[in-house]
Amino acid sequence: MNVSQSSLLWIILGCSVFALLFAIWLARWVLARSRGTADMQKISDAIQQGAEAYLARQYKTIAALAIVVAFVIAIGYGFFRTGLATDPVNNAKVMALYVTLSFLLGALSSGIAGYMGMWISIRANIRVAAAATSSLNGALQTALRAGAVSGLFTVAMSLLGVGGLFAVINNFVPAGLPATEWAQRIPYLIVGYGFGASFVALFAQLGGGIYTKAADVGADLVGKVEAGIPEDDPRNPAVIADLVGDNVGDCAGRGADLFESTAAENIGAMILGVILYKSFGISGILFPLVVGALGLIASIIGVMFVRTREDADPMDALNRGYYVTAALVVIIFFFATRWLLNPASAPDAWWHFFLCGLIGIATSIAFVFITQYYTEYRYRPVLGIAEASQTGPATNIIAGLAVGMESTVMPVITIAIAITASYALGSASGMEGAGLFGTAVATMGMLGTAGYILAMDVFGPITDNAGGIVEMSKQPESIRDITDRLDSVGNTTKALTKGYAIGSAALAAFLLFSAYLDEVRNYRGTPVEVNLAHPQVFVAGLLGAMLVFWFSSLAMTAVRKAASSVITEVRRQFRERPGIMQGTESPDYGRAVDIVTVGALKAMVLPGALVVLFPVVVGVLFKALFGLGAEAVAAFLMIGTIAGILMAGFLNNGGGAWDNAKKYIETGAYGGKRSDAHKAAVVGDTVGDPFKDTAGPSLHVLIKLLSTITLVLAPLFI
Amino acid sequence: MNVSQSSLLWIILGCSVFALLFAIWLARWVLARSRGTADMQKISDAIQQGAEAYLARQYKTIAALAIVVAFVIAIGYGFFRTGLATDPVNNAKVMALYVTLSFLLGALSSGIAGYMGMWISIRANIRVAAAATSSLNGALQTALRAGAVSGLFTVAMSLLGVGGLFAVINNFVPAGLPATEWAQRIPYLIVGYGFGASFVALFAQLGGGIYTKAADVGADLVGKVEAGIPEDDPRNPAVIADLVGDNVGDCAGRGADLFESTAAENIGAMILGVILYKSFGISGILFPLVVGALGLIASIIGVMFVRTREDADPMDALNRGYYVTAALVVIIFFFATRWLLNPASAPDAWWHFFLCGLIGIATSIAFVFITQYYTEYRYRPVLGIAEASQTGPATNIIAGLAVGMESTVMPVITIAIAITASYALGSASGMEGAGLFGTAVATMGMLGTAGYILAMDVFGPITDNAGGIVEMSKQPESIRDITDRLDSVGNTTKALTKGYAIGSAALAAFLLFSAYLDEVRNYRGTPVEVNLAHPQVFVAGLLGAMLVFWFSSLAMTAVRKAASSVITEVRRQFRERPGIMQGTESPDYGRAVDIVTVGALKAMVLPGALVVLFPVVVGVLFKALFGLGAEAVAAFLMIGTIAGILMAGFLNNGGGAWDNAKKYIETGAYGGKRSDAHKAAVVGDTVGDPFKDTAGPSLHVLIKLLSTITLVLAPLFI
């Protein structure tokens, strides 16, 4: 148990750098693939141009907002902390400096992670399309390895950021403080990193989610429903905007989302490691980063395992890679817990924590199965929606909403078991107060496979885009068949990642609350009770849950409004330029892209600002009125998180189920394409779009942002 | 302040009996109206027959379930209490006897209240139709007074039940206990009454709600959409079932709902009155019943004030009656607080509590306005849904869902202000620990107008039925015009009652939690903390919120399944007997009624059982595993209530908004009837049906049932 701090940091930073280098090698491998025909390139270039333009404008907006927040943090800490400075470390200026800098660094890194996801995907889409002209395996590997570029980059950046900040700040021990004491303070100083990451992720996911669904809904409603042309038809002026959307929403947004998840959860776990410093020393604080870094290597091996026979289901190959990764993570946990969480004073501790890690890994696998059950058309829920489509759109919608609500049951029971079991194992480890650390280890177990999961996720929009390119460049049926198969697998993997993201958010939620409560206790000196028997605390919780409903409403309204401007534009082009429908004139794709860009950026500000400001207002108000700021914020955060977990599950799974109910009917059931049942199912699919790709994923970020904002702004409420 | 117990009981029982007599007089007045033409009578008789048959079968099912529960309570108390018997009153057998008896009495009374609502409405519908042939005022007064029969009966029964139980048990002072001590125990002994009332209300509202919407959705989907015949067309075999549904769902279900609300909230407030016994004596315990009883007189006066000019908007007349009632309740509170809550030790207390009462009354008025804003087509939300209908059903659905979610914001803020303000006023009253009693007085203020509100509510289905009878008996346009106007007002009043019910549930929620916590403290001797910082408590809260999603899903699925059996039946009749559509053959209404009856009763058991069993399982499991039964149940209850309040608001208002968006388009907007926008709006309206009439109202009952079941079964969890 005499592990030196520097050797741990060396492992963390070494593995992360290796993963980055490997990601670069993968990127070069992907870029070396063929770029296909000139027709394909024309389309891909248009997508690339639109995506780059959108992201540039989006980042400009976010950067402006982030700088404002950085000022607020710097001033807030400098001003409010003064009164709390009872020891040399609680020095207001030092705190203000570190927290603000780590906020800015977190925001920047989150932006880069999102950008990287999009950068590779707009380059990979055409290469997957070209690879599909020769083999399924080539297309599958190109798409997954491109996804892995994003996945490895995101997780490695997060570990480098948190680990690097730790290593750097570690060198600036304040005068009069022992170095070991200082090491225990650092996790509190870098909470800003998690907040910066969540802040950018919120706007990236929200803006991207609004963009992608406004374009999708707008293109479908005018194209498929009014003009009667197929999906991805080049005559549709919004078709490029739709393809751009997959990149800026799914790739850039989800990249930022998982970046902030790993950052926030690692910092939260480190804070819980501080509590056990007496037993574990520095190992407990750095354990989360060590297993995360080793997990990257597991993900790399898992990705390289993936190959498929030409006639096989490509989902099997992806599943195989996932199971390889998960098995390696189990081995990593066995050795890491033995090595790092094995104090002489508690000889049985390590295997208790190893079991906690297993619980986390099992939870992630359980979420994969549950999500598949609720969103694939092999199972009862989706089949029920398809059946209900026979009696029209209304029964299709009722069935889909019911499936979405029901789909929250099993995940909640899984989470309930995971939290209570890992807490009980931690408590039984023979160490005092280690229950919460048990839940932290379980969360780390769940996050161990994050790199691979994110690779599978980015795989989805890449194959979606490849399918669009193949369709628009009028390739033969056999090639479309390959991209269609990959696209269908991509839909599944996207749904899985959402399940995984919400599962890890739920498991990590308690970890982050505890970090917050611990921080408040540190400042106040007394433990915090979030006692719902106080009316004010109860009311704050009620407000937290309400925020989730309000935010979801704003997100869906934003999509609807942005979509309606797309619809107006497409109708205008069809009306004013009749040559478009006859195929003699090319539509103005660029204008549609511009309109969605402006619409999405405008629409993201209100819901985003609401999420950032509302908890602050509640905390400040409850502090001023009742002197219960910290407790009110805790209840707001916890009950908001509960509502967010449920609402996100409802929206994600409901949306996924509608999508696949439509796909099931398209296989020929209940009259197949163009039947009345199919028309009804298209309505459900369209309603599901903002559910599963805007409001749902944004709620993942909202949950974490509530945690990180309260961690950073805690001094305001005390 | 030296008020004798018997004079208070005399007021409570006296006013209640007077209100019952007045209700009988009103019923005789209604029954004395003309029953119209033979054609009308034929239809009305069919409705009456179907409704009676359904309710008879429903009550048989519920009675069987209630008897099982009564046994469980009797045995549970007799067995589990033994160990707790530390004083003569905690005698297991005495407790088991009183709680079980009061459960059965509550169940019986709730059933009678529901039956009365239906009894009068199936007799009033035809009389309103007949009155419409001569005057608007006649029809309005007939419908409202019939509604008042149900409203007065329900509230009076509840007061008689609670007050009567108090008076009776008061005579059985156990040996060795002072009478004043015994009086303070009685509220805990009659909690069974509230549970019995909620238990029956849950099944009545759920079964009735499934019935009414299965019939409605089924009739509409085949009739309006497939066969292209108008609503309430006599050729539709499900039309009688649809009209029956209004009675068994809206009248019987809502009657039982408001019965249990008043019962549960009065008992909860009495328990809080016990805490202040030292200051208030018996006045504090009986205050809730006294103001409730005087509120009945206010409601009677309000109802008698309602009359309308033939060319006026009948909603104005109903609003006038409501404001008269509310003003009288203000006066009642002024005198009642001065008289009963005015201890010599705290000379300023009374006006603090008077202000609490005002807050309650203001809250109920605020809810009326907010509900109107979100569900009437004069305002932005509904207009937005109508506008979104232009681009098809998908955007109509997205817009409606967004409106529903947004509609939770203002009510939650209102509730937050009402709870914290009344708590602060109570705390500032100069009496120790009176904060919670302040929220109780506010709840009483809100409930003061319950009789009038329920009269307005039952007005809705009566006018709806009257419209159906006028339509089916082919009356001239001018008469239809009158019933259409009343029907439209009825839609508004139904929405208002739901807003009121959920508002009072939210305001009362905290009252009922406190009663539960107080009960637990009484048994355990130590105060209970519902500290969310404990993982197990947090997990229990998560499960409580999940129950709300699960239940909503089951309720909506139940409607969809029952509706699909109606659809199959109607299609069969159209197919096998072509004479029906040509008008030469009469459809078999009875078979459709039977099918819905069987379907609804079968479908209500699963969601109902879930609500009753889930909290018990959680409590017992968390007690066995973690020794935290009472805390877990408290978190389950509180966070389940928060989720329930939000979900019910979402469902009720979303459903109401869709309904009126369709009505707005029918006035000619966006192409009017038969336009594409109208078709899209019909989809939204159909989706909204199970929202606003099944799942939403059942959630009101669910919230209260969670409170009453935990109050009754508390000994199991300690």
Image: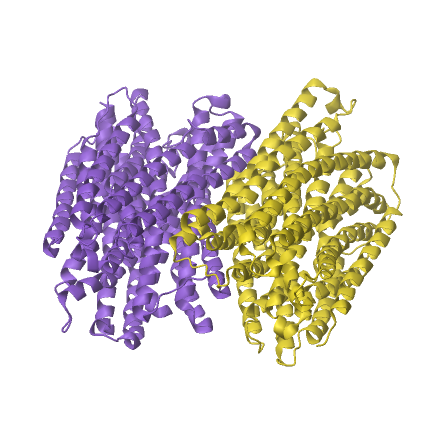
Chain colours: A purple, B yellow
Q: State whether residue B313 is above or below residue B680.
A: below
- The residue sitting at 31% across, 62% down in the picture is A518
Who is closer to the viewer here, B70 or B253?
Answer: B70
Residue A337 versus residue A143 in the image, above or below: below
Res B465 visible? yes
Quarter of the image containing the C terminus of chain A? bottom left
**Residue B264 at x, y percent in the picture:** 64, 55
Give percent across and percent down for residue A666.
44, 25
In the visual, does B212 lie left or right of B423? right
Q: Residue B522 appears in which quarter of the rendering?
A: bottom right
Q: Nearer the viewer, residue A240 or B81?
A: B81
Quarter of the figure with residue A104: bottom left
Q: Is residue A46 left or right of residue B683?
A: left
B24 versus A37 height, above or below: below
- Number of labelled discs? 0
Pick the residue in front: B107 or A447. B107
Nearest the viewer among B135 and A384 is: A384
Q: Percent from the top left, x then y, of residue B668?
A: 65, 44
Q: Where in the figure is residue A239, as x and y percent of width and height?
A: 37, 37
Q: Is residue B380 left or right of residue A283?
A: right
Q: Name the residue rendered at 33%, 70% in the picture.
A: A524
**Residue found at the far front of this picture:** B176
Specify whether residue A573 is in view: no
